[in-house]
Image (cartoon, rainbow, N blue to C red):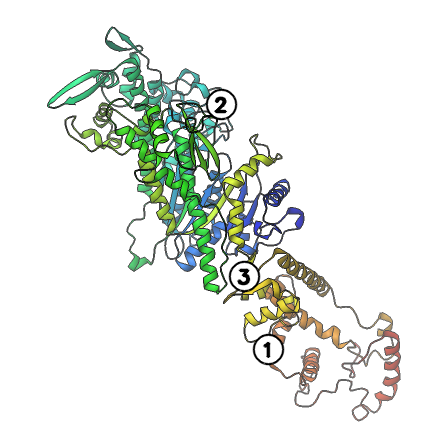
Amino acid sequence: MAEQESLEFGKADFVLMDAVTMPEFMANLRLRFEKGRIYTFIGEVVVSMNPYKNLNIYGRDTIEQYRGRELYERPPHLFAIADAAYKAMKRRSKDTCIVISGESGAGKTEASKYIMQYIAAITNPGQRAEVERVKNILLKSNCVLEAFGNAKTNRNDNSSRFGKYMDINFDFKGDPIGGHINNYLLEKSRVIVQQPGERSFHSFYQLLQGGSEQLLRSLHLQKDASAYSYICPGAQLKCSINDGAEFKAVADAMKVIGFKQEEIQTVYKIVAAILHLGNLKFYVDGDTPIIENSKLVSVIAELLSTKAELVEKALLFRTVATGRDVIDKQHTEQEATYGRDAFAKAIYERLFCWIVTHINDVIEVKNYDTTVHGKNTVIGVLDIYGFEIFDNNSFEQFCINYCNEKLQQLFIQLVLKQEQEEYQREGIPWKHIDYFNNQVIVDLVEQQHKGIIAILDDACMNVGKVTDEMFLEALNSKLGKHAHFSSRKLCATDKTLEFDRDFRIKHYAGDVIYSVTGFIDKNKDTLFQDFKRLMYNSSNPVLKMMWPEGKLSITEVTKRPLTAATLFKNSMIALVDNLTLKEPYYVRCIKPNDKKSPQLFDEERCRHQVEYLGLLENVRVRRAGFAYRQTYEKFLHRYKMISEFTWPNHDLPSDKEAVRKLIECHGFQHDVAYGKTKLFIRTPRTLFTLEELHAKMLVRIVLFLQKVKLPLPQELSSSSLNHPCSPFCLCCCTDSRLWSLLDIFRALSMVLSGALVWWELQGLSPFGGRWRAAELIRSVPPEVLPQLRAKVAAMELLKGHRADIGLQRAWQGNYIALKPDSPQGSGSFTPVANELKRKDKYMNILFSCHVRKV
């Protein structure tokens, strides 16, 4: 359980809700957001709200608070999940992964960066140079990938338009030694067209705003983004990204990662070539296609290190092999425009994949021998697009939402599996939990021969002209009876669907209407072979490397390439298989509103995200009849102070029996179950009651500690010290006052971790010594303790003043009152001592003897 925050901040763990209902979930989420608590647990899952403002909760001090701590010991935080994944990897040699999900603008990318920052901060205490290099590259890679893979959307100024899974490799000491990045489905259509209010990828604007005059001249560019057709719609949009500053940061990061200067220059040339491609216009003169602004062809050829005539031919003609003959087929204006756009998208996608590959080459684990260096373990971090529902949902949203279906299925399966396995290990009966199993939707999309992707591929492979409408007709024919699929033809009265255009899928997150327009072309992802050969024959070695298939002759027969949907499906299946082999941790990101306001909590907007992230089902699965579970040892460590049977230590046969005794003495035995190593508590109310008892006892102990830090109160008043008897009385105080200190410090040793060190820091080391002494004499029989205590007190008082302090004889304490030892003084001492007893209300004189006044 998380460290208890005040209830004014709501419940730090949704598992502890009194009732698992949507209204209570939303009320707690709202309360925590409005109180500035953006993180909340669901067991070992972190729910993260985007605060839309900078919070001072990620610094070095915060990192130290979470380093090496258990999840339940600190308030909810990303660092708690990161540390839990790191500990599992390091202590148990388990490969782990952190899955970050949520819609665009919910804070996934920021969350992944903070997790990377935490892991970098807590590793490599020895400051090994190679480890520092790897850490630096891993952190800098985020900056580069954001520039080329992120864009401003209507929901988020820095939206990731690709999925990213990063494996970080660690050596046996827990230090990062390398990594690997996989990227998924870059939204390359954004290169040529953007929705109103959105921009293309940051890299275009950064080059124009941040590039020097000399660089822009060499690339034949001007700073005004509105001069370029591909990006002009977003040229005047306000964006929180500082393009000029980011350009320099990206250039510096690329140098740190290991990009050579000529490689960085090639990147700029490719970005510039794409901008110039967008400005090409075509028209047909009779039967001959012509480029309207042909001067740009020479510029593009220069930037791509090839010949202008080859660029022009690739743009206007398509080389076709018919048997043994090879002919050049002229493009129509429409075909030429399609070819140009396909070329621009392909160049950018190849550039992005080359950047990822280059980073992987640099951070790849090299020369690692497990027999010499020990096991190489991994933490994976998945930052991937969330469920998307737009006004116009096309092929990209279809793929993204399919991805989320797969991940949601994995999430429920793994959480459920973990719960079942824990119950089986502990011998607790498993209670069946009702939850929405979205396997039926996953099958609807990916099933062999019957799923939507299979039907789409069949349509793309048909001979002759195939239209999007024909694809929709095939869907209606084959999926018409499926409970999660509908279209206007199947539901004629549903006017939210357009005839021959729309179909609806009932996703776990809600209904989504997809427009089939563009599905066939985007799935085929056709790029004429002429462009591939053009790039392969470039004199620039980097460009040549990006297009290896360009070496094939036009007459060489090749296998039909896999479609875009099938490639994505295969990558998702591989990703899920990879995640299944790891111990998962989850960060579920929520966007509080669409206005990017730090104060506004949009109830309807948040509820929708809670529903499609399956958070309420997650709570139900996690509860499974029991809201909380903890090992007996850790439970005792926290709560043993609230029972006399367990405080300060128990003498029962086992921790389990001690916990049972503690639970029974407070009457909670009907609300718990006892596993083999853990206690399971059914309702949150029991846990909160335990916490209240713990808090009350802690206050009492702290108050006593504050008293102890002050000087010990004088048991004799100043007037008593001036009494004629004062030379005889060295120490007069009560037994309870003197010896309760030992008891309290014994207690504090159990309450405060590292208590002895704490005493020393606070100048209380004498009490630390007494605590140690108390620990040493625990085995002394009770009947001997009073005499032993008196001897120890005398030893301290007389140290250095008497050679023999009477260890070999019985302790009597009040020696002046004993007539045989002090016949002269006892007569006058006794009445004076009795008078002091009456005035100062003390009971016994522990020790008295003659002293010399100085």
Q: Tell me the residue that label 1 is attached to.
A: 776
Q: Tell me the residue that label 3 is attached to.
A: 630
Labelled pair 3, 2 in contact (Cβ < 8 Å) = no
- Say whether residue 588 is left or right of residue 701: left
Residue 519 occupies quadrant: top left
**In this view, the mark in front (3 or 1):** 3
Q: Look at the picture and state if 37 lies above or below 840.
A: above
Q: Real-space Cα distance between discs 3 and 1?
A: 31 Å
The answer to whether one can see residue 354 in this image is no
Question: Residue placed farthest to the bottom in the image?
Answer: 820
Q: Look at the picture and state if 555 lies above or below 94.
A: above
Number of other residues with Cα within 10 Å of mark 2, as a class: few under 14, some 14 to 19, many 20 or more: some
Number of other residues with Cα within 10 Å of mark 1, as a class: few under 14, some 14 to 19, many 20 or more: few
Q: Earlier in the sequence, mark 3 or mark 1?
A: 3
Q: Real-space Cα distance between discs 3 and 2?
A: 50 Å
Q: Earlier in the sequence, mark 3 or mark 2?
A: 2
x, y percent for residue 40: 56, 47
Amino acid at dot 2: Gly
Amino acid at dot 3: Gln
x, y percent for residue 145: 40, 35
Residue 733 occupies quadrant: bottom right
- Total marks shown come to 3
**In this view, the mark in front (2 or 1):** 2
Q: Real-space Cα distance between discs 2 and 1?
A: 74 Å
Question: Residue placed farthest to the left in the image?
Answer: 324
x, y percent for residue 432: 49, 55
Labelled pair 3, 1 in contact (Cβ < 8 Å) = no
Residue 277 occupies quadrant: top left
